[in-house]
Image (spheres, rainbow, N blue to C red):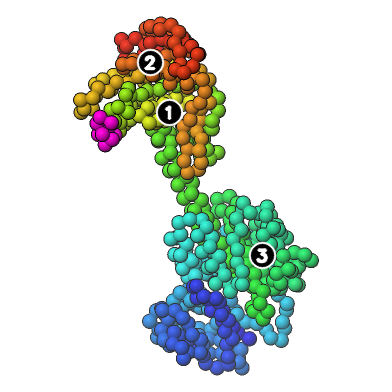
Amino acid sequence: MWTFTIRVPDRKPEEQIIKTGRMTLGRSTDQDIVVLDTSASRKHAEIFFDETQGTLTITDLGSTNGTFVNHERLTVARRLYDGDVIRIGGSTLMVAYRDEVKVEPPVSGARRYTRELLLEALDHHAVLLYEVSHQLNVVTNLDAALEKVTELMRKSMGADKCEVILESQFDELEEIGFPTSIAEDAIRGRSAIVVPDMMQSPYWKSGESSRLLRVKSALCVPVVSGDDDHVLALLYMYKVAGGTRPFDDRDLQLAVAISHQAALTILRMLLLEQVQKEQRGRQLLQRFLSPHEVEFVLHDYLENGQLPPLDEREVTILFADIQDSTGMSERMGAKAFGEILNRYYWDLTDTIFEFDGLIRYAGDGILAVFGMTGDKEEHAAKAIQAGLAMLNHVEATDFQTTEEIIVGIGINTGAAAVGYVGTQQRVELTALGYTVNIAHALQTLARPNRIFVGPKTAVGVAGKLPLRDLGMVGIKNSEQQFHAYEVVRNTDRLEIK
């Protein structure tokens, strides 16, 4: 008995039994075999089955786009053999012969996923793969890609159920109802497995999901990365309806071909996700870091998915604040003061970045942390260099207002809990502890346009610039006192030795 298995993109495969005599193929609904393809002519080709001779031939009937057998366009009548592939437009007709007298039960089999198997599959199903790749190439996220792959597989294979199981789910196969014995063979052997009759196969085991789901025929193909034969996922499909054509080697070939497209799509989606993650990380880091420091911190972010967490570190904290900012805002109006504040932030942020500081905005104030990136041994000196440059810049800038812009800067060195806290959507640089409180207290005293530093900062820059001893000072609303020093502004930049 001769049969054609007709495969049309986005439609279930159909099996057509070839009758004795002549049969016509074409797009018209009055043809013996209707080919639903826009490239097919209304009356496209003719099949002749000579039952006496046992021969099957095909003739093109002058179609516009031609009839192809095994990639060759017909110019004369051609005899067909078992395994031939007819192409009309984007539709393929797989020729098969089954001996009705000697019917052997279908046998389960596994074929190792090799380059030769893939090339064979691509060669036999190039037309369908063109449609598959066209649809997958417009998908822009992994979930949508997997959904599209399962939809295409289910339709093109005529399966009742199709699933793509990612590598991350391999440990959960039993929980999600996947026959673990088939999966283990496919993964361990890098093999494509076809099971025409589940009940007659060695995979039919009491209690396994294939029995519980009344699976009649199954097919499992690994989705393999081309570079290292790494299994990215499994394509698994099955049929449950009785009387339907079981999966065979031709179906396995098609599944292998589609799995290759699935592998390319999954790799593309993973790469796209990595790029998007890197872009999000870079945008986030640029809020706090100088451009040349972003790449340094980004490496850790991409490795473990998070920024440096809140942890105790030896750092230098700088606080800068505008004197009487609330009064200025009331006198000038919110919009005018906002423009000044924007200019203030913009310029001083670049200055802090120049000296390897991290930054956080707090109202009209700026908190900067030195010692987490860059030269960690000289963070006290870097903080003072930044402070001097900030004051010089403020004094030299025309803010186009009659209001006098007065700034105070406090700097203190010591142990503080510093890092990033928040959620996936929003994180902030945070600095907590006594060292931070002292720096904040110092800036409230450093008026007008002065820099006050704590004792450990003074020790860190001893001999590098002149300091004025201010004696013991206290924190507002606290009985605590500490030694403070003022940076004498006779130099713009320290000579770090």
The boundaries of the magenta stretch are 330-339
Q: Is most of the magenta stretch helix, strand or loop?
A: helix
Above or below, 343 against 205 in this view is: above
Q: Mark 3 points at which residue?
A: 193
Q: Earlier in the sequence, mark 2 or mark 1?
A: 1
Amino acid at circle 2: Leu
Q: Where is residue 31 in the image (x, y as percent from the top left)?
A: 47, 89
Instruction: Indicate the quadrant where residue 3 lies.
Output: bottom right
Looking at the image, which is closer to me, 292 or 58? 292
Look at the image and tell me whether residue 208 can be seen.
Answer: yes
Q: Dot 1, how many residues are within 10 Å of its Cα: few (below 14), some (14-19), or many (20+)?
A: many
Above or below, 374 against 58 in this view is: above
Q: Earlier in the sequence, mark 1 or mark 3?
A: 3
Report the quarter where the N terminus lies: bottom right
Looking at the image, which is closer to me, 155 or 247? 155
Taking the spot 58% from the left edge, 64% from the top edge, the residue there is 256
